[in-house]
Image (cartoon, helix red, strand yellow):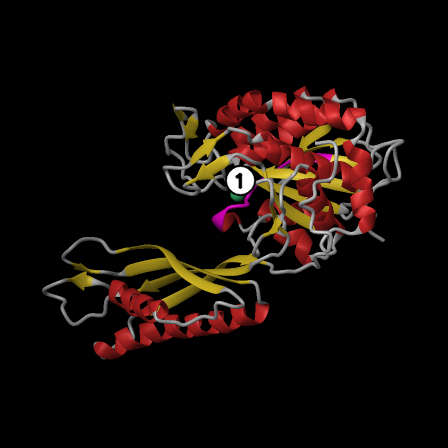
Amino acid sequence: MDTISRNTDSELVSESTRLVYEQLMVDGKVKAGLKFLEKDNENTAIEQIAITEIPSPTFQEQKRGLDYQRRLKEYGLQNVEIDHQGNVFGIRPGTGKGPRLVVSGHLDTVFPAGTNVKANNQNGIIFAPGIADDGRGLASVLTLLRAIEKAGIHTIGDIIFGATVGEEGLGDLNGVKALFENHKDIDGFISIEPGAPERIIYLATGSRRYHVTYTGAGGHSFSDFGKPSAIHALGRAIAKISDIQTPSDPKTTFNVGTIKGGTSINTISASAEMLIDMRSVSPAALSELEEKVLEIVKNAAKEENKRWETNEIQVDIKLVGDRPAGTQPKESIIVQSALASAAALGFKPILEEAGSTDSNVPISLGIPAATLGGGGDFGGCHTLEEYFDPTDAYYGVQKIFLTILGLVGVDKLSQPLLSKRP
Ligand SMILES: [Zn+2]
């Protein structure tokens, strides 16, 4: 681990970045930090379980947030505060005049209140809803903070460690949006999600999400036969949406994720609703798809009314999700640092396809940001069968550790690669 690996794609990593990483990799304190992360692997997994077992559905992250605040304080972070949105962040000041980098996981999970989140260890593999997404990110932030503290590393830039709320689903990135609204002095952002050490997400998929509700008078299925049905209108819409063709490049997708409605088997339904998710890396392709879907949704009400010669069925369309799309070049310093860090650990770095994570917001604002994998094997994210295997997971956090140090600079060793915003 003392030299830059031969795997480095020299065309991808600039000479100046590579030189910084050569300096970092031979430093005693940096080596001590890397060693600490390896030794802390099991402890990190234990903490990951403890955090995961505190239920934290989107919009109900308070309990886990308080617990997380306590942990951040315990490991020496200063001014650890919960903001009005529910984000928890504290600062580890640098020696001064350096850039300000945020390192963050997300507190929320997709699992509703009442979900059994107790961890179940099967031959070393931990099963629990949310254990990877984003139990891994939250535990990664804490072990990284400990490693920098224990190794006695003085950074030049400030590092803001913590976690956001509202990353998943209808949270609509409300945590990270508030963070960037209230802090105009953030120069870079790293989001930690489950993922392999070599993978780097640096492009942002945009999404638009709608809550659509059909309503009508309803009635008895036999005696009121002839009245339009909200469920039938919904069915018409879904059938047509299912047939839409979207481009694979730029990747553009749609999904009706949930449906709800009706009263009983023998009631003409008075209400039916669905949630629709649309995504694309291209803002233009996304709005084209959105236009088609909204047209279908409105027409379905008309068609159901026409079938029964009435105008009883109404449709209400509510925008419930708007995540910005964005791109940055491979030459962006945060991408460079992550690539060089992965290579320094002997991995062949892979630039991932666009993602939809907290990094979308800074990327859309032109602030260098990347979503990096916390290491370990994982699967079943967003399902009740979600699992995490902590074997060798420390490689993920080691990669992030090096990325952070390169970006903020280390006192008397390396200048920050990340620039302060003008
Ligand atoms: Zn996540």
| Residue at the image point whose x is 46% and y is 37% from the top | 378
Q: Determine the image quadrant of residue 313.
A: bottom left
- Please name whichever residue, 233 or 201, is drawn nearer the observer in this view of the structure: 201
**Seen in the image, is 278 located left or right of residue 27?**
left
Q: Taking the image as drawn, is residue 84 in sight? A: yes
Queried whether the magenta region covers residue 167, the answer comes back as yes
Residue tagged by mark 1? Answer: 194
Q: Taking the image as drawn, is residue 77 in sight? A: no
| Residue at the image point whose x is 10% and y is 64% from the top | 222
Q: Determine the image quadrant of residue 101.
A: top right
Pointer 1 residue Cβ closer than 8 Å to ligand 1: yes
- Please name whichever residue, 41 or 139, is drawn nearer the observer in this view of the structure: 41
Residue 264 in the image: above or below residue 108: below
Q: Residue furthest front?
A: 6
Q: Determine the image quadrant of residue 24.
A: top right
Residue 348 in the image: above or below residue 376: below
Please provide the residue range marked out in magenta: 160-169
